[in-house]
Image (cartoon, grey):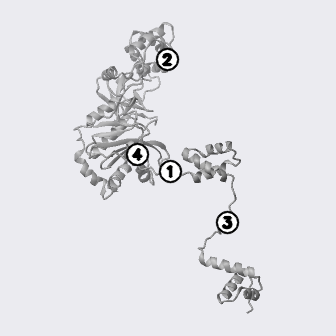
Amino acid sequence: MTAVWRNREELAHQVAVLAKQGTSRRAIARALGVSRNTVRTLLSAHERGRVLEHVALSPPPTRAPRPAKIDTYKPRVAELLVRFPDITAQRVFEILRDEGFTGGYSGVKRHVRAARPPPKPTPSRVTPTYGPGAMGESDWSPYEVTFTTGATAIVQALSYVLVDSTRKYFGLYDSNDLHALMDGHDRAFARFGGCAHQCKYDSQKPVVLRWECNQPIYNPRFLAFASHYEFRPLAVRRGHPNDKPRTERSFWEVERSFLNGREFRDLDDMRAQLAHWLDTIVDHRKRGQLTALERFDEERPHLVPLPRHPYDTARVVYRVCGIDGFVAWRGNHYAVPYDHVTDLLPVRITQRELFVYAADLRCVARHELAPRGAGLKLDPAGLHPAPQRHSPIDLDQLQVAFANMGDGAAEFFRLMSAGPPRGWSAQARQILLLRARYCTDEIDRALAHAATFGALGHAAVERILAAHALPRTLDEYVAEDTARRIEETLGHARTGAA
């Protein structure tokens, strides 16, 4: 047989065909004009190809193992791993080097990694079980959100979870302070129609002021809130997430199911989408054969019933009404009737509104809360026109305000106002704003002292007050008399106004 082949593939094909027909390797070599070694190689490759699985990449060539310097020290390494299970490869290398080892660290590291016994599997921590309505869990988690307007904000997500049914509530806020915490609980309780008998928290300041050994010292205002709803707060140490695993796990659900794949116009739009997500997705998610709503139907009768009226979660602060008729709060100014300029007024702030009260606690102004730090001057009700610069009415109000503080203030104003208004009106306004930090009698004495020496500037008056007067203490959360009694009982110092 005369065969003609033009490439190795044709040669391999003809060798395989002739071998299949029973031709000997010698005869195949003669017929095709190749050596017997070539025939043997081609037939071996043919047999391997029929047996082994095809791979795109050829396997790397195998090499005969070469002795390594670590081989003679392997018994010593095994001994060290038995005696010191947590010993590091670096420490093993140092010991072997002191004993005469001349190899490198990489070889030791590879051998220790292969020789160290794998760690024993640790079982999942067992979480305690509670009966229906017995326990809830709550926590915060911050998220940086970029709205479709391009604005970026840190949004605080509040989670409240009923442990038995695992029904969840989430709220979104621009801060995680005490008032946001109480407002979120109010809304969670209203959604559930009740609350758990106990609720776990970490050591967040709105709940726990500090720890005395292993005893938490709770925030008195939050205790009053808990007393109103008749549930018991239970504080756990920070860094122990397994103490409240359900609320910790709930934020994974927020990240994967709510924040993922959604866009928000602003915080209000985000809250609206969150409410829809809670109603249509979270409440109907199954665990086993039952949804959260179906499990909650069994837990509902065991919850603590709600009181007739929700707890007032509003913040109360005191602010001086400026000479222009506005009070300031978080980067915005809200109009107040002009009758109250320079007065120290109580201001009540909810999550959406701001109320200003007169000294007799009459509500004199009500505003929708503006975004924090917007720098707005808000007067939607037209309480007073914008004052003209250095108008006679404006200057007369300044004179009346100083006269009402006392004789020393009146004399100071008489001396100050001797020059043109553009030189002293701004200084007079700054002095009036000191009423937010110091008592009126102290300011009157300081102004009399300043007038004696002709020190008619705001800075000089402030230095005199700092040296001779104590700052006023303003309680943001409770009335002054209540704060005094709390301080006497618990020994907490109240915050000095800045």
Q: Amino acid at mark 4?
A: Glu
Q: Dot 3, crowdedness within 10 Å: few (<14), some or many (≥20)?
A: few
Name the mark on residue 458: 2
Q: Amino acid at mark 1?
A: Pro
Does 402 sit left or right of 358 as displayed? Answer: right
Q: Which residue is mark 3?
A: 62
Percent x, y of residue 345: 35, 24
Q: Which residue is mark 1?
A: 119
Q: Dot 2, crowdedness within 10 Å: few (<14), some or many (≥20)?
A: some
Query: In the structure shown, which secondary structural element does the residue marked by tag 1 occupy?
Result: loop
Q: Earlier in the sequence, mark 3 or mark 1?
A: 3
Name the mark on residue 248: 4
Would you place residue 235 above or below residue 117 in this image?
above
Q: Quadrant of residue 468?
A: top left
Number of marks drawn: 4
Q: Amino acid at mark 3?
A: Thr
What's the CA distance linking mark 3 and mark 1? 32 Å
Does 30 sit left or right of 198 as displayed? Answer: right
Q: Earlier in the sequence, mark 4 or mark 1?
A: 1
Name the mark on residue 398: none
Does 298 sit left or right of 235 as displayed? Answer: left
Mark in the foreground, 4 or 2:
4
Mark in the foreground, 4 or 1:
1
Q: Quadrant of the N terminus?
A: bottom right
Q: Earlier in the sequence, mark 1 or mark 2?
A: 1
What's the CA distance linking mark 4 and mark 2? 52 Å
Mark in the foreground, 1 or 2:
1
Query: In the structure shown, which secondary structural element does the residue marked by tag 3 occupy?
Result: loop
Q: Are marks 3 and 1 in contact (CB under 8 Å)?
A: no
Q: Dot 4, crowdedness within 10 Å: few (<14), some or many (≥20)?
A: some
Q: Earlier in the sequence, mark 2 or mark 3?
A: 3
